[in-house]
Image: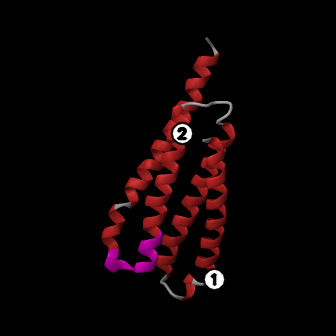
């Protein structure tokens, strides 16, 4: 599973750069400053959590357990829900503001992912001390 997280993080990294460039060079001519700020927030949080996913892939060999797998899953689904909903809101405009209901669920998954990451590392710390 750890190699899959690294592969997915690499793909998301390329996608994040593309989305950032799209926002900076194309969207700024089409959408409002407020919508562009929403889009940039999506890109920023996608980047933060793809780096977290990459870290999970890198440390999984040392700390292999189900909690790290769940951390990675939470980050992936969180990116889809949080960043994806922000991209949609920024591009589609205020008439689709109902989509904003999804964003906090993605944020909650980010938080849960960090908790799983912490508990996955702590779990192994306790196991190695026995």
Q: Which residue is mark 2?
A: 69
Residue drawn 64% across and 17% down?
A: 128
Please give the range of residues in magenta.
87-96
Element at badge 2? Answer: helix
119 above or below 110?
A: above
Q: Nearer the viewer, residue 41 or 3?
A: 3
Classify residue 2 by image quadrant: top right
Question: Please, which colouring scheme is shown?
Answer: secondary structure
Q: Where is residue 8? Give x, y as percent.
A: 61, 54
Q: Is residue 3 magenta?
A: no
Residue of label 1: 25
In the rendering, at what x and y percent does residue 96 appear?
33, 75
Q: CA distance from mark 1 to mark 2?
A: 36 Å
SS type, badge 1 = helix
- Position of residue 26 relative to residue 50, above or below, is below
Category of crowding for the residue at label 2, using alpha-carbon neighbours closer than 10 angstroms: few (below 14), some (14–19), many (at least 20)? many
Q: Is residue 32 left or right of residue 22?
A: left
Q: Which residue occupies 51% across, 72% down? A: 39
- Return the mark for residue 98: none
């Amino acid at each position: 599973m750890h190699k899959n997280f690294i592969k997915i993080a690499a793909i998301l990294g390329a996608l994040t750069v593309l989305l950032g460039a799209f926002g900076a060079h194309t969207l700024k001519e089409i959408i409002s400053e407020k919508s562009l700020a929403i889009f940039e927030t999506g890109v920023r949080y996608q980047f933060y959590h793809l780096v977290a996913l990459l870290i999970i892939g890198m440390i999984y060999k040392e700390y292999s357990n189900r909690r790290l797998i769940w951390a990675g899953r939470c980050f992936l689904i969180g990116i889809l829900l949080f960043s994806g909903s922000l991209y949609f809101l920024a591009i589609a405009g205020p008439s689709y503001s109902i989509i904003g209901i999804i964003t906090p669920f993605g944020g909650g998954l980010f938080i849960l992912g960090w908790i799983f990451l912490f508990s996955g590392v702590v779990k192994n710390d306790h196991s190695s001390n026995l």
